[in-house]
Amino acid sequence: MADTEFRSVYVHVPFCARRCPYCDFAIEVRRRPSLEDWTRAVAAEWRQHLEDPRVQVAEPLDSLYVGGGTPSTLGPELASAIGRWLGPTRLPGAGGEWTVEVNPESFDRETAQAWRSAGVTRVSIGVQSFHEPALRWMARLHGPEGASRAVEIADAAGFDHVSVDLIFGLPAHLGRSWTSDLDRTIGLGVPHVSLYGLTVEDETPLARAIAAGREPGTDEATYEAEYLEAAERLTAAGYEHYEVSSFARPGHRALHNPVYWSRRPYLGVGNGAHSYAPPRRWWNVRDWGSYRGLVLSGRSPVEDTEIVTGEASALERIWLALRTAEGLDPGAITGGPPGSEAAQLLIGDWVERGWARRAHAGRGPIRLTPHGWLLLDHLATELADRVGAPPEGLEDDRSPP
């Protein structure tokens, strides 16, 4: 890894009061986690980063994202604690973004006011649904009115940037009305909405329940129909569908996640956190106890690393670019014939099928439609196969695709 300036940092808080049945994140189930214990560990890892001569951290950062897990379980003092070990000069300044994820049941007025005073600019609320049986099935601790209360608290504390998460593709036997959930979400008036489709990850309680026949498998027709309904309804309500799962009112696009989509450098802190300095990606051990033991004894928590170049780099660039509304300029990937000719033929087929559109008639970036986004993995792989390896030197370019 050459000397790299990191302008974005992700901080992981692993604690959750319960584990959702579909969750495969690096979490630790604790109802009353210790802020002091967590701070001591992540601060130790942060010192390792600052002592690495190859790492340069911008002052201030462009974006800071605190995710989990459930960061709000650590309460009002979380934000000020992060500010102390991160360093006040590194906190995002004017025009920057500091996001913290919250769950409605652990987000109160004291916490909201303390975080806002410490410099947090944005909260992301894990709503998932307004339907009580669905919330119980997901092991969520808030009721149907939890989202409204959380949004009111955020508004009262002065947060102009508020996002809510919704999950689609839930089993039909729950009786959840996706249309009703969209109505409730739009009625909240929040400026940002993120959608997540229910997926069955190996080794999760949901996967075991499906294998044992206690739960049905994924209903692809429901999954697709609900995604398309959300895209249509939210767009009609004034939200810009700026990424496969992200919707924002004008001026409210998230700043941190596009760092990932454009393959810019970022540092991750905490168990299971990932970091990236093109072309190198590395990640920490997932288990909280193992991570804590390593960093407090002065050892690196890094579990593994990979170098992303060649065809793997080309596939990643294509996949990440196609997931955004800005789309992909095929010429930036193909580097000219013969790959460009094959790519253009393929893209023409996508346009005819309604999976993609051109920014300008017959030329310019290719942008997927919501129907195309449902096929994102397949389309990206298909295009990468036509393109082959990128032109020499392209895989190490740090600029957005």
Image: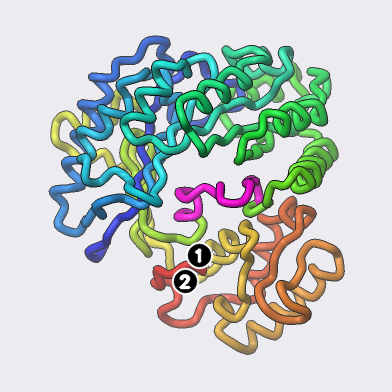
Give residue 246's position: percent from left, percent from top.
Answer: 62, 46
Q: Where residue 299 sits in the image (x, y, percent)?
A: 17, 38
Magenta span has 279? Answer: no
Magenta-colored stretch includes residue 246: yes
Q: Amino acid at mark 2?
A: Gly
Say what secondary structure mark 1 lies in. helix
- Does any portion of residue 304 appear in the rendered image? no
Residue highlighted by disc 2: 310
- Viewed as shown, does residue 72 lie left or right of 217? left
Classify residue 293 by image quadrant.
top left
Q: Residue at x 74, y 51 (%)?
A: 374
175 or 96, nearer to the observer: 96
What is the number of the mark on residue 312?
Answer: 1
> In the rendered view, does 299 fall on the left or right side of 358?
left
Q: Nearer the viewer, residue 44 or 252?
A: 252
Disc 2 crowd rating (10 Å Cα; few below 14, some 14-19, many 20+) is some
Label annotation for residue 296: none
Residue 36 location (% of width, % of height): 23, 19
Neighbours of disc 1 within 10 Å: few (<14), some (14-19), many (20+): some
Q: Position of residue 346 (x, y in %)?
A: 75, 74
The magenta segment is 244-260
| Residue 285 showing in the rendered view | yes
Pointers 1 and 2 in contact (C-beta within 8 Å): yes
Residue at the location (16% across, 41% down)?
47
What is the quadrant of the N terminus in the image? Answer: bottom left
Look at 37% across and 63% down and name the residue there.
278
Q: Is residue 302 above or below residue 70?
A: below
Secondary structure state at the residue bearing disc 2: helix
Label 1 to label 2: alpha-carbon separation:
5 Å
Q: Nearer the viewer, residue 218 or 254?
A: 254
